[in-house]
Amino acid sequence: MAFADRLNNVETSAIRELFKLLGKPGIISFAGGFPDSAMFDVEGISAASQRALAEEPGAALQYGATEGYQPLREQLAAFMAAKGASDVAPEQLIVTTGSQQALDLLGKTLINPGDKVIVEGPTFLATIQCFRLYGAELISAPIDGDGVKTDELERLIAEHRPKFVYLIPTFGNPSGAMLSLERRKKVLELAVKYQTLVVEDDPYGDLYFGAAPPPSLLALSAQVPGSRDWLAHCGSLSKVLSPGLRVGWLMAPPELLAKATMCKQFSDAHTSTFAQATAAQYLKVGRMPATLAHVRAVYAERAQAMSDALRAQLGAAVDFVQPQGGLFVWARLTGAGGAVQDGNLLAQRAIAKGVAFVPGAPFFCANPDPATLRLSFATADVAKIREGVAHLGQALAQP
Ligand code: PMP
């Protein structure tokens, strides 16, 4: 069969192969990028879905507006207002089928084959694949523990004049990094200075363990004149409530939002009205703050357990910054004491010892660092985390 040329730009991810092994009984998995299903608020979501059916069956089961179900748009605007973006009107956002669809719509509306897009190195794998599918040439901006290095970012913007810049400023996937306040302001200033759209992907911002992170680029944009015209923001209920609901949202300057809405219409017409009505009911009764407090506490404990275990079991052979939120520890094998320094090799050895994680190299769109690893602490409990990291230590010590 003759497939579209655009498929030549992407390949199925190397990670998929690894995921096939995860079904093996007894494997402790640090591999997935998803929340722990044991923490889903089944009772709250079930009650919300029943209220949706009882109170608004005509809306919950019927076709709906492409922009999204209005009561949900209102609840999402209020949700963002509570996090500092108090001037977002419901009409300034559209509901998307997960934030993944928001990324796809941005690709579809903005990228011509050969256009340059700057992303963090490393970044979310599905973003790399999605933008490449539209023919983007991706340019990698380096990060450190404080997120993207803004001096480098400015140099790259000035040199390449990209179509847009894509960042995960708060607890990045896979990096776990949190962009500092100073750098956040700088990013917004760069957007205005170079008249370049910045896309803020923010599915993890609510999953902080200690003090709240600095305000989102969206919230901060109120303080940087002109920056709102150059900012798109993607949000999601996936990591905090349930990815199965497929409720995300996109906020963007009006012209871009209108084009994205048009593309969404041709794609899925609208996000499931049943899921939207359920999410709206859930947010309306004010259950979210307690849910957030619960998931933050559980993930904080697991992040701590994983960090402690890595230090104890792998010592100088691994280097990482303890995450302050999100779902991931991003680590680098140092090779200390002659230990293996290849993430792929370690992943294979680890599987044989009963533990899975994702090597870091595929998360780079250029110049992959083969010594990196992404370890998710989200789905294993503390005891399993300790056991899994001990196996990892054995895999490192004895092939
Ligand atoms: N962006 C990032 C950075 C992610 O990690 C994910 C999920 N892994 C998504 C977007 C997509 O999430 P969803 O479509 O479930 O909202």
Image (cartoon, rainbow, N blue to C red):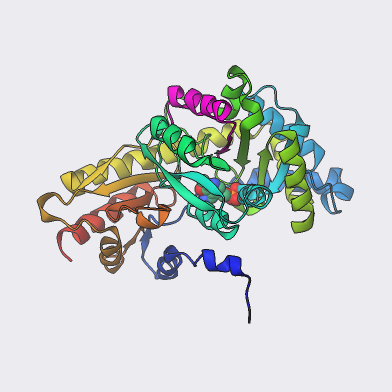
Name above or below for residue 370 compared with residue 160: below
Q: In this view, does 338 lie to the left or right of 154?
A: left
Q: Nearer the viewer, residue 362 or 133?
A: 133
Is residue 213 something that shows in the picture?
no
Quarter residue 315 falls in: top left
Which one is nearer the viewer's eye here, 317 or 43?
A: 317
Identify the residue shown where x is 25% and y is 45%.
309
Q: Above or below — where is 286 with respect to 168?
A: above
Q: Quadrant of the N terminus?
A: bottom right
Please state the extent of the stretch shown in magenta in the rendering: 179-202
Q: In which quarter of the image is the C terminus?
A: bottom left
Residue 328 lies in what quarter of the image? top left
Does 168 appear above or below 53? above
Q: Where is residue 292 in the image (x, y as percent from the top left)?
A: 55, 35
Residue 166 is left or right of residue 210, and the answer is: right
Query: Looking at the image, which is closer to me, 350 or 182?
Result: 182
Judge left or right: residue 28 versus residue 50: left
**Magenta span contains residue 192:** yes
Instruction: Please check the rendered image and state whether residue 107 is part of the magenta-colored stretch, yes or no.
Output: no
Asked if one can make out residue 297 in the rendered structure from this viewpoint, the answer is: yes
- Taking the image as shown, residue 133 lies to the left or right of residue 286, namely left
Q: Where is residue 244 in the image (x, y as percent from the top left)?
A: 63, 54
Residue drawn where x is 27% and y is 48% of the image: 332
Q: Looking at the image, how many numbered discs can be counted on the residues?
A: 0
